[in-house]
Every structure is written in structure tokens, then in C-alpha cells.
Image (cartoon, rainbow, N blue to C red):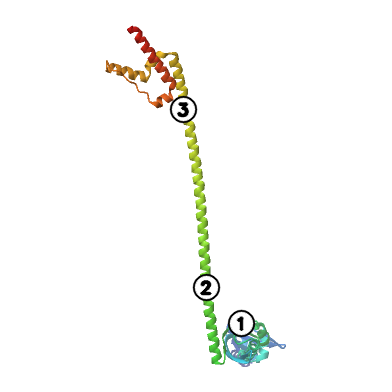
């Protein structure tokens, strides 16, 4: 009985080793339950009751023949990288079957579908209107339909070229594109020259405005300076007038004193000069010169001095007689 148990255990152990496998990180393990495709999440799985589906990317290089408007043949080259869609894995199994290379089988179906999409798009446009960017945008809008129908997810897509099949047409298009680029370049150059001229004109206007503003500021400063000078000159004139008035008042008071006291004339500078001359030259006659400016400024003093001299003369004559 013991041997039977040991044999059964050995058989079960060998069966487990033979049947169960360890799930790798880049593998998707599928099983069917009640007609639905379910993803196994355990680390170990039975290989005869599961489908091992690789999760690695599958690259595709497509060279498709299509036609443009006017029935002109074109060649479209597209590079794709596809992955199985975990969300739509049941769609992938229905299209490709319960096979390990399901993604390869579905990729062939994808090539057919993309070829149909390309023809659908290119037949609407002329050959000169087609471009890689426009075709890429169109195919990019079909990603959700591809995922729902095939269970594949496009990880990357590049539309490499959209060229006419006829080399002469391709050369004509290249020349047309070259001419368009040259024309666009010339327009850009002319636009650059125009912008440069506008910038120069604007700069000159700003310089003129700045110079005009500077002249206005100089004028205002000069005006303020002249105003200040006028104020200073006015103050000087007022001070000069005030000094002259004070001087006139002083001279007026002096004349009044001399008119009341003629003997004080001997203390004046003119009398001092006369006395000095008399002492130096005993028999000489001293002439005291009074300038016209002094006569004009002091007419009263001159009259008083003349009267004083006349009085001295008369007194001297009386003594002589």
C-alpha cells in the first residue's frame, strides 16, 4: 500500500513538472472559461490548458500600391509596430485563432485593412495634394477601429513616403516642390527685407521723436535758465536802484548840512586838494578840476562851492582895500 502511494506521488510530481510552466514577464497567458477568454495572473500555468501569447512588439514594413485621383498609381511606404491589445484580447483570438503566433496572423489582416484605408484616402485627392503628414493623420484616426476589429494596438506608425509610381511624374513633382520652396524662400527674403526696412523706419522715427523731445527739454531748461537770469538781473537792478536812492538821500542830507554850514566845505575833498596845492606852491594858483560827471551828479554842491569861493574872494578884496 505504501508503494502505491509513493508511486502516485511520483506520478503526480512528474505530471506537475511536465504540465506546469512558469510565466515570464513578457508573456500573456490565456485560458477559456464559459466561452470567454480570460487572462491568467498566477505565476504558474498548465501549458495544455492555456495559450502562451508573447507580448513583444511586432514590426511591420508595408509597401502598398494605391491610386490617386485621375487613376495615377502611387507607392506608399509605412512602418508599423503593433502589440496585442490586452483590453481586446478576445478580438485577437477570434481573428487569429487559438495559436501562439496569433499576432502574426492578425498583422496580415491588419496589412489588408490598412491597404484599404490608404486606397480610400488617396482616391479622393490629386497626386500633388497627397502628403505623408495628411495620410498619417487619417490612419491615426482609425486606431480605435483597428483595435476593436483585430485586437491589435498600434504602438508606433510612420508614413515614410507617398510617391508616384511613374518616375517622370515623381521628377515633375520634385521640380514643382523645388520651385515652390525657392519661391517661398524668395518671399521670405523679400518679407525679411520689408520687415528690416519697416524696423529701420520705425527706429528713425523713434530717434527723431527722442531728438525732438530732447530739444524740447533743452528749450524748457534754457527758458527756465533765462527766467532765473531775468530774476537775478531784476534783483540786481532793484538793489542798484536801492543803493542809488540811499546814495541820493545821503548826498541830499550832506548838501542840506553844507548849505546850513558853509564853513564845512573846507572839509570836503575838493577843498582839501585846494589847500594842499596852496601849501606846495606859495605863489601858484591851484586849479581844481571838477569833471562834467561830478557837475551833473552834484549841481547843488557845485553852486554852493562856487558861492563859497565868491565869498572868500570878496572878503579878500575888502581886506586889501
Q: Earlier in the sequence, mark 2 or mark 1?
A: 1
Q: Tag on residue 126?
A: none
Look at the image and tell me whether residue 310 can be seen: yes
Residue 299 in picture, x, y percent from top left: 43, 22
65 or 222: which is nearer to us? 222
In this picture, is 70 found above or below 251? below
Q: Which residue is mark 2?
A: 190
Neighbour tally class for label 2: few under 14, some 14-19, many 20 plus, Cα within 10 Å: few
Q: Secondary structure at mark 1?
A: helix
**What is the number of callouts on the image?**
3
Give the structural element (helix, strand or loop) at label 3: helix
Question: What label sits on residue 244 in the rendered view?
Answer: 3
Question: In the figure, residue 152 lies in which quadrant?
Answer: bottom right
Mark 1 Cα-neighbour bin, 10 Å: few <14, some 14–19, many ≥20? few
The answer for how far apart the CA atoms under marks 2 and 1 are is 30 Å
Residue marked by disc 1: 134
Give the CA separation, mark 2 to mark 3.
79 Å
* Disc number lying in front (1 or 3): 3
From where the camera sits, is residue 43 visible? no
Q: Is residue 177 left or right of residue 282?
A: right
Viewer-side label of 2, 3: 3
On the image, the x and y values in percent for residue 229 come to 48, 40
Q: What percent of the width, then of the height, locates residue 64? A: 59, 91
Q: Is residue 16 left or right of residue 217?
A: right
Q: In which quadrant of the rendered image does the C terminus lie?
A: top left
Q: Residue furthest front?
A: 321
Front one among 25 and 7: 25
Lower position in the chain sequence, tag 2 or tag 3: 2
Residue name at image x 53 percent, y 72 percent: 191
Amino acid at each position: 500500500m505504501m508503494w502505491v502511494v509513493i508511486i502516485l506521488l511520483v506520478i503526480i510530481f512528474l505530471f506537475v513538472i511536465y504540465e506546469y510552466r512558469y510565466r515570464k514577464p513578457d508573456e500573456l497567458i490565456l485560458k477559456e472559461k464559459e466561452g470567454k477568454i480570460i487572462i491568467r495572473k498566477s505565476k504558474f500555468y498548465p501549458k495544455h490548458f492555456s495559450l502562451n501569447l508573447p507580448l513583444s512588439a511586432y514590426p511591420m514594413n508595408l509597401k502598398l500600391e494605391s491610386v490617386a485621383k485621375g487613376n495615377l498609381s502611387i507607392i506608399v511606404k509605412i512602418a508599423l509596430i503593433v502589440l496585442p491589445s490586452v483590453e481586446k484580447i478576445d478580438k485577437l483570438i477570434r481573428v487569429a485563432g487559438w495559436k501562439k503566433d496569433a499576432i502574426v496572423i492578425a498583422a496580415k489582416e491588419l496589412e489588408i485593412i490598412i491597404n484599404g484605408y490608404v486606397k480610400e484616402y488617396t482616391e479622393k485627392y490629386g497626386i500633388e495634394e497627397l502628403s505623408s503628414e495628411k495620410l498619417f493623420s487619417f490612419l491615426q484616426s482609425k486606431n480605435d477601429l483597428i483595435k476593436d476589429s483585430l485586437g491589435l494596438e498600434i504602438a508606433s506608425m510612420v508614413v515614410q513616403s507617398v510617391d508616384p509610381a511613374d518616375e517622370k511624374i515623381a521628377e515633375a513633382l520634385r521640380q514643382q516642390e523645388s520651385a515652390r520652396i525657392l519661391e517661398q524662400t524668395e518671399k521670405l527674403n523679400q518679407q525679411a527685407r520689408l520687415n528690416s526696412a519697416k524696423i529701420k523706419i520705425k527706429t528713425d522715427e523713434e530717434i527723431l521723436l527722442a531728438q525732438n523731445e530732447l530739444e524740447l527739454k533743452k528749450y524748457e531748461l534754457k527758458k527756465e535758465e533765462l527766467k532765473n537770469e531775468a530774476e537775478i538781473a531784476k534783483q540786481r537792478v532793484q538793489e542798484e536802484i536801492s543803493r542809488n536812492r540811499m546814495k541820493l538821500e545821503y548826498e541830499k542830507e550832506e548838501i542840506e548840512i553844507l548849505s546850513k554850514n558853509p564853513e564845512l566845505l573846507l572839509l570836503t575833498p575838493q577843498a582839501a586838494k585846494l589847500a594842499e596845492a596852496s601849501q606846495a606852491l606859495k605863489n601858484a594858483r591851484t586849479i581844481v578840476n571838477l569833471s562834467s560827471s561830478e557837475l551833473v551828479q552834484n549841481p547843488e554842491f557845485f553852486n554852493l562851492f562856487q558861492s563859497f569861493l565868491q565869498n572868500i574872494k570878496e572878503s579878500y578884496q575888502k581886506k586889501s582895500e
